[in-house]
Amino acid sequence: MTTIDWIVLVLALASVVFYGIWKSRNIGSSENFLAGKRDLPWWTIGLSIMATQASAITFLSTPGQSFFDGMEFVQFYFGMPIAMIFLVLFVLPVYYRLRVTTAYEYLEQRFDLRMRTLTAILFLTQRGVAAAISIYAPSIILCAVFGWNLALTNFMMALFVVLYTTSGGSAAVSRTQELQMTIMLSGLVLAFILVLYQLPDGVGLTEAWQIAGATGKTKVLDWSFDFRDRYNVWSGVLGATFLFLSYFGTDQSQVGRYLSGKSLRESRIGLLFNGFIKIPMQFLVLSVGVMVYVFYQFNAPPLHFNQVNRAKVAKTEHEITFQRLEARNDSLFLEKKVLLDGLTADMRNGADGVPDQTGCNSRNWKRSGTCCGAKQNQ
């Protein structure tokens, strides 16, 4: 990294901390610490909820999901709007009427202190484990890029998070997440544009999407009812609805965001905003992975992307086998590139159709009925 890169990185991190602390200054009670001053507008609530659910893991792993499996993961979020509508109609009014600061305070009023204590402990344990994973994932990336010590990086990131959360409470988290989510969404759009820009001349968004579609990467809807299938319309509408009801309705990491709203109306709009924007956001995240997949159809991918693991194989009894596999991988890539060059030439010349999974286009199908030794489907 250059000096200007370091300056931007340090200023961005420092601005997040000081922005959150400044916006949540004058915290004078436990209620203000847990629910802020209850003055958050709907857009802050919505972006904060999205940022809480969409941690760094989302932006690191979800593109990888679509790289290998395509766009079907977006169906998992089809139940979110349904869950949000139910919450804004039946759950939020109860929380606001009781003026609670946490979801577990409601349980104390409904049952007793023991129930509140039990659920609070379960929440803290669960969130502690989840936070550890959320910190660990970006730490791996930072260590790979900068060569930092992993344990030290984890410690510094945890210290950074504890600093601004304990200094400003819930309001600091919501305010900084508003800024963070804006940065992350902008980064997603920029990443999509940069990957598209790196594709060869003559391969634009339409051509790239057609190439990805030939291998099933762009398939979004799966109407099959199969219990062995993780992602389809039915699991998204049925299973995910109840999952999101439990998560957004009872998990304090979410409840604390919309209890900080300036009114019931603002909190309702914030939740609905999250519910209906989340699907397009996930579509964008998955699209980045699909574009990366197309990029590696024109640029030779490594046999194994993790260079740390690649280095471990060196000078072992498996190195020769790995080198043979690499040579085979390079040979297959060259064969595939010849087919893709012909396909993109057809696209530029206005040929209709897209390649099927064998790498052939519909012009060849129409001409001979066969392609690459495969029979045309009837």
Image (cartoon, helix red, strand yellow):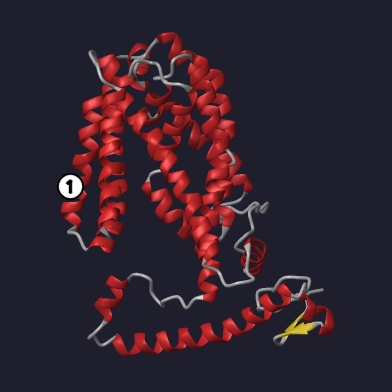
Quadrant location of the C terminus?
Answer: bottom right
Question: Which of 149/175 is in front?
Answer: 175
* Dot 1 crowding, Cα within 10 Å, few <14, some 14–19, many 20+: few
Left or right: 198 in relation to 60: right
Question: Which of 107/21 is in front?
Answer: 21
Residue shown at 50%/26% (left/top)?
270
Q: Disc 1 marks which amino acid?
A: Phe
Quadrant location of the N terminus?
Answer: bottom left
Q: Name the residue under label 1.
A: 155
- Quick check: can you spot residue 118? no
Q: Where is residue 88 in the image (x, y as percent from the top left)?
A: 54, 22
Residue 252, quarter of the rendered image: top left
Residue shown at 40%/26% (left/top)?
257
280, above or below 168, in the image: below
Left or right: 230 in relation to 376: left
Q: Where is residue 58 in the image (x, y as percent from the top left)?
A: 42, 49
121, above or below 355, in the image: above
Q: Where is residue 144 in the image (x, y as percent from the top left)?
A: 27, 63
Secondary structure of residue under mark 1: helix
In the image as oriented, which residue stretches furthest toward the front? 4
Question: Which of 375/110 is in front?
Answer: 375
- Quick check: can you spot residue 131? yes
Q: Where is residue 244 in the image (x, y as percent from the top left)?
A: 49, 35
Left or right: 150 in relation to 277: left
Residue shown at 45%/75% (left/top)?
301
Number of dots carrying numbers: 1
115, above or below 278, in the image: above
